[in-house]
Image (tube, rainbow, N blue to C red):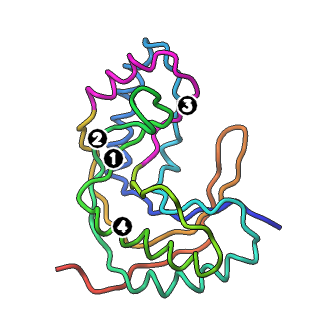
Amino acid sequence: MSIRAFLAVVISEEARQGVARLRDRVEKGVMFTGAQPSWVRLESMHLTIKFLGNIEESAVEKISARLGPACAALSSFVYGVRGLGVFPSPRQPRVLWVGIKKADEEFKQLHQTVEAELSALGFERDERPFHPHLTLARVRSLKGAAQMMKIVADNGREWCGECKAERLIFFQSQLHPSGAIYTKLREFPFEGPPKA
């Protein structure tokens, strides 16, 4: 049997509440632009390190056997949640995201570690550069996009909170009409020495 899965870092309650306040402000502003973003549920918001797609259930143990020791060698780190942006571009905003600050090197190292361990199991490496972010909304249509981008720019530097990354979490994602439901399969703590 196959399952849909991904690897992610979860955010702090402080940051989640900060993102909720930011979303409320943006949602009110966007309401009159004609844009129709599809908002992500805040309680399931996470920072994806790698999307695995559909994998065999039997692969969970093989993946865990590699990621457990690899993550144990990494150190926990602090990062900030701040600002708004879009992918792929302001002219064609398809994903509205909240930014991650102050831990570029740590996230890069985590992503590279995950990629190395998974490529050894036959998973393809991500072609695109890794940009840590939190998906706030998906934009299905470009209607009202220019006006929406003004709201995004007005809130572009908003601070949402601080988080500590202490573990990588292996999630299963089940798609339902009401939205995806995420189930935690495994946790891989970062047990390396604290950063100086």
For disc 1, the marked residue is 99
Q: How far is the residue under mark 4 from the one under mark 3? A: 29 Å
Name the side, left or right, on which 184 lies relative to 16: right
Type of the residue with mark 2: Gly
Q: Amino acid at mark 4?
A: Lys
Observer-side mark, 4 or 3, equals 4
In terms of secondary structure, where does tag 1 sit? strand
Mark 4, other Cα within 10 Å: few <14 / some 14–19 / many ≥20 = some
Q: Closest to the observer: 23 or 60?
A: 60
Residue 30 image point, x, y percent:
41, 20
- Residue receiving disc 2: 83
Q: Are marks 2 and 1 in contact (CB under 8 Å)?
A: yes
Q: Quadrant of residue 80?
A: bottom left
Checking the image for residue 66, the label placed there is: none
Looking at the image, is 73 positioned above or below residue 127? below
Up-down relation of residue 159 to residue 189 (above or below): above
Residue at mark 4: 108
At label 1, the amino acid type is Gly
Q: What residue sits 39% from the left and 29% below the top?
A: 90
- In magenta, the rendered stretch is 134-155
Distance of label 4 from label 1 (alpha carbons): 15 Å
User: Where is mark 3, residue-wise?
Assistant: 38
Secondary structure of residue under mark 4: helix
Please provide percent x and percent y for residue 84.
33, 38
Task: Pick whichever, 70 or 183, lies toward us.
Answer: 70
